[in-house]
């Protein structure tokens, strides 16, 4: 179908040609948009070239705030946690929670496993016993043939941990998987895992057909972003009588636990509850150059592991203490990918004192639990909107092009009032009219 918007060979055009094509088609009467694209080019040509290598058809850069949440107490060590997010209240909430838990002993985190999974998905109409015998006969041989791909990973303490046959024919006729378990040391390991799966699959198809006269149909060879064995647990606890929240410690702890109980049994609440956790985790994952989409997918799958979507975190009262904890799968890396290529990701890891993958998992999990705490705390005390509206006011003022004096006056005026665009606009117009 002919269409004036269709373009042939777009990826072969240079950056200026791509922008010019946009100007002539989608942005004909929007010169300001063309200027914005050019305005966000980096003045350092090397850095701009580096950015353009991260994705296809790069035209410009989309910037997000790079922030710090200081005073994060995790396992007896204080961190300044780098966070990348556009949501105005996230960093403030994380920093506030860090200060709160600093006064109550901080966060305790432990990695319970670092195993990641990958699968060769295939269809086969013969005997399952032949598949198992083939695996038993060739497992060691294949491990040796794959040594060129695994040697460096093994030197760093990682490698293939196990390979198993799984029969899914009860769900889909003839469907099987070779299920691999990997330790990828300090790398997220996606490229390593997928390389191993593809190489093993090629050996399998050829050798099995030769030995058994029946060729399996391999359909997929891919890692999984659901990694329930790549798990970190984080916990915080406070003596209830020492809680200072504007209500009695007993009342606060009771309401806090009830709020977590609601998220445990009500999936509508659980989704938003877990989104709050991921506000913190995603910000750390982005800042350190890790894959927040994979982390998100794995976390929400883990929240559904019982067959019903539920809260990732939990709270209870024991021995006079409010205990707040979470287990979550986090497949993170501190080497490989863009973690050391992207200059800001490298800086983020430097700020964290160059953690290994396990330490980064603990930091991200603690940040997520802190974010969750701040949200629940607001909900059971002043309400979520009071804090959000303070940040919302700032966004409104940015759009209204106010002076520094007007910003201060409006911030003071709306400190304890409901914030919405019309009210702010009317008050600003009133002051400007009176001043004129």
Image: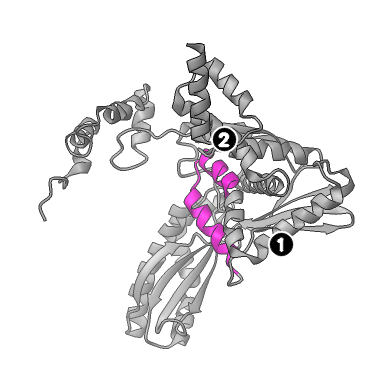
- Residue 82, compared with residue 265, is above or below; it is above
Residue at x 67% of width, y 63% of height: 264
Q: Give percent across and percent down for residue 2.
A: 10, 52
Q: Residues within 10 Å of mark 1 (few under 14, many from 20)?
A: some
- Residue farthest toward the left in the current orientation of the protein: 2
Residue at x 56% of width, y 15% of height: 405
Q: Magenta part of the protein: which range?
A: 278-305
Left or right of residue 427, residue 273 in this image: right
| Residue assigned mark 2 | 419
Q: Residues within 10 Å of mark 2 (few under 14, many from 20)?
A: some
**Is label 2 in a helix, a strand or a loop?**
loop
Q: Nearer the viewer, residue 313 or 206?
A: 313
* Label 1, label 2: how far apart the Cα atoms are: 31 Å
**Colouring chosen for the image of the structure:** one colour
| Residue assigned mark 1 | 261
Q: Tell me, yes or no, if residue 2 can be seen here.
A: yes
Left or right of residue 178, residue 274 in this image: right
Residue 303 is a magenta residue: yes
Q: Nearer the viewer, residue 298 or 161?
A: 298
Q: Nearer the viewer, residue 239 or 298?
A: 239
Q: Tell me, yes or no, if residue 182 can be seen here.
A: no
């Amino acid at each position: 179908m002919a269409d004036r918007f269709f373009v042939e060979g777009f990826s072969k055009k240079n950056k200026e040609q791509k922008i010019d094509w946009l100007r002539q088609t989608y942005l004909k009467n929007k010169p300001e948009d063309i200027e914005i694209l050019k305005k966000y080019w980096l003045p350092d040509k090397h850095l701009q070239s580096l950015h353009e290598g991260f994705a296809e058809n790069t035209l410009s850069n989309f910037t997000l705030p790079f922030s710090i949440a200081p005073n994060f107490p995790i396992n007896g060590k204080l961190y300044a946690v780098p966070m990348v997010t556009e949501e105005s209240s996230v960093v403030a909430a994380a920093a506030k929670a860090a200060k709160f838990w600093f006064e109550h002993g901080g966060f305790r985190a432990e990695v319970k496993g670092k195993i990641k999974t990958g699968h060769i998905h295939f269809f086969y109409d013969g005997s399952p016993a032949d598949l198992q015998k083939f695996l038993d006969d060739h497992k060691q041989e294949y491990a040796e043939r794959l040594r060129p791909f695994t040697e460096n990973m093994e030197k760093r303490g990682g490698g293939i941990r196990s390979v198993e046959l799984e029969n899914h024919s009860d769900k889909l006729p003839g469907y099987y998987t070779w299920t691999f378990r990997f330790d990828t040391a300090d790398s997220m390991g996606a490229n390593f895992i997928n390389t191993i799966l593809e190489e093993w699959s090629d050996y399998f198809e050829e050798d099995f057909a030769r030995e058994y006269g029946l060729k399996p149909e391999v359909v997929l060879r891919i890692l999984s972003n659901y990694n329930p064995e790549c798990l970190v647990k984080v916990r915080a606890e406070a003596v209830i009588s020492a809680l200072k929240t504007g209500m009695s410690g007993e009342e606060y702890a009771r309401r806090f636990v009830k709020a977590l109980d609601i998220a445990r049994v009500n999936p509508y609440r659980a989704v938003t509850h877990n989104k709050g956790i991921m506000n913190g985790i995603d910000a750390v994952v982005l800042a350190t150059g890790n894959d927040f989409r994979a982390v998100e997918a794995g976390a929400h799958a883990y929240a559904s592991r019982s067959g019903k979507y539920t809260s990732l975190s939990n709270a209870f009262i024991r021995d006079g203490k409010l205990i707040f904890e979470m287990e979550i799968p986090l497949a993170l890396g501190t080497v490989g990918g863009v973690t050391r290529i992207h200059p800001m990701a490298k800086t983020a890891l430097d700020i964290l004192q160059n953690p290994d993958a396990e330490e980064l998992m603990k930091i991200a999990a603690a940040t997520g639990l802190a974010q969750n705490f701040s949200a629940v705390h607001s909900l059971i005390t002043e309400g979520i909107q009071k804090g959000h509206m303070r940040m919302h006011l700032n966004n409104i003022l940015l759009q209204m092009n106010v002076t520094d004096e007007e910003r201060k006056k409006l911030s003071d005026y709306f400190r304890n009032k409901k914030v919405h665009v019309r009210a702010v606009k009317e008050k600003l117009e009133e002051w400007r009219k009176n001043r004129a």
